[in-house]
Image (spheres, helix red, strand yellow):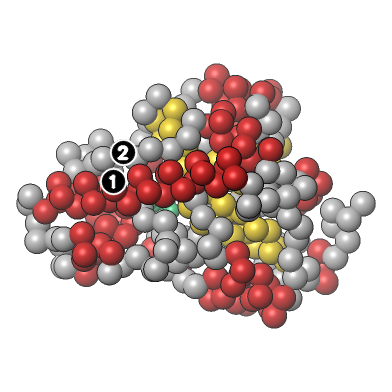
Amino acid sequence: MLIDLHTHSLESDGTQTPTELVAEAAGRGLDVLGLTDHDTTAGWAEAEAAAARYRITLVRGIEVSCVHEGISLHVLAYLHDPSYRPLLEELEAARVSRAQRARRITELLAEDFELSYDDVLAQVHDGATVGRPHIADAMVAAGIVPDRDAAFRDYLFTGSKYYASHYAPDPVTAVRLIREAGGVAVMAHPFAASRGRLVTDEVIASMAAAGLAGLEAHHPDHTAGQTAHAAGLARDLGIFVSGASDYHGAGKPITLAQEVTPPAAYEAIVAGASGVGLVGESESTRGVGSG
Ligand code: AMP
Ligand code: FE
Ligand code: FE
Ligand code: ZN
């Protein structure tokens, strides 16, 4: 089974519609696709319809932005109830703060470059969660940098003089809310040091105590050593090892299923969730999680 449970559409910082993403996944022969836009379920309905049409199993999810003592981290939520108020309120607060923060970063950039917040908004799909990749896209459109990667490398990296942070819930709170919503929580790219400061193993242990179910050890931003460390920590904590591509469409030089999700992680997610079910099961996955 070919499974990739971490991807983005243009409802956050991916570059494809949910339909295009599902169609590409089906075309590449994936059996199961997870849609995990940052802090929003806005792409779910369209992805559901597309999954039924393309006969691929869809795992509905989100990637929850979190902050612990000034360190940014991401927690994937799978198959949770999207109407659970306490979680929705945290996601909404993060989304509002993300927009304010994008304006702030743009103001800092505007001191040195010809760039306005309208230029950034022109890169954001209506209602989508705003992130640094959209600022990068505006910089590309303005001819300041050739691509997203150069924008991050030279101007948008965490710690840059143009950087600003945003509000997001503490990870222990996020894990608790995901569980209360019937979802399964998996920490995304836990040791991707290239993205900025990392939380300690002790913080991850406290997340596990709150119900974190797995660690995304296999991720394109992890070195072999970081993957091994994540797998070892997962084993010590008694939680599962996951993996995925974190595909963002044309926004990054990463292909769908570049890293894949172990079937055992997928089965644990399906078995552990009670918020919403799978959609559009393909033949090869019919029956998984039904016992
Ligand atoms: P933000 O959510 O606004 O803090 O921005 C982080 C997002 O930018 C993550 O979703 C990453 O996938 C994306 N990102 C980080 N580094 C790069 C890069 N070098 N090129 C393209 N996208 C990146
Ligand atoms: Fe992203
Ligand atoms: Fe992430
Ligand atoms: Zn992601």
| Residue 231 locus on image (x, y percent) | 63, 33
Residue type beneath disc 2: Ser
Whether residue 167 is visible, yes or no, is: yes
The extreme bottom residue here reads 53
Q: How packed is label 2: few (under 14 Cα within 10 Å), some, or many (20 or more)? A: some
Residue 127 falls left or right of residue 146: right
User: Sequence order check: which comes first, mark 2 or mark 1?
Assistant: 1
**Between 202 and 260, the one nearer to me in the picture:** 202
| Residue 250 locus on image (x, y percent) | 41, 68
The extreme top residue here reads 202
Q: Which residue is at a point 16% across and 61% down the rendered structure image?
A: 116
Residue annotated with mark 1: 101
Residue annotated with mark 2: 165
Q: CA distance from mark 2 to mark 1?
A: 6 Å
Residue type beneath disc 1: Arg
Which label is found at residue 200?
A: none
Mark 1: is the Cβ under 8 angstroms from ligand 1? yes
Q: Which residue is at a point 75% across and 60% down the rendered structure image?
A: 278
| Residue 219 locus on image (x, y percent) | 54, 47
**Between 291 and 249, the one nearer to me in the picture:** 291
Q: Which residue is at a point 35% across and 65% down the rendered structure image?
A: 124
Q: Quadrant of residue 181?
A: top right
Q: Which residue is at a point 19% across and 52% down the rendered structure image?
A: 106
Secondary structure, mark 2, is: loop
Would you place residue 274 above or below residue 3 in this image?
Answer: above
Secondary structure, mark 1, is: helix
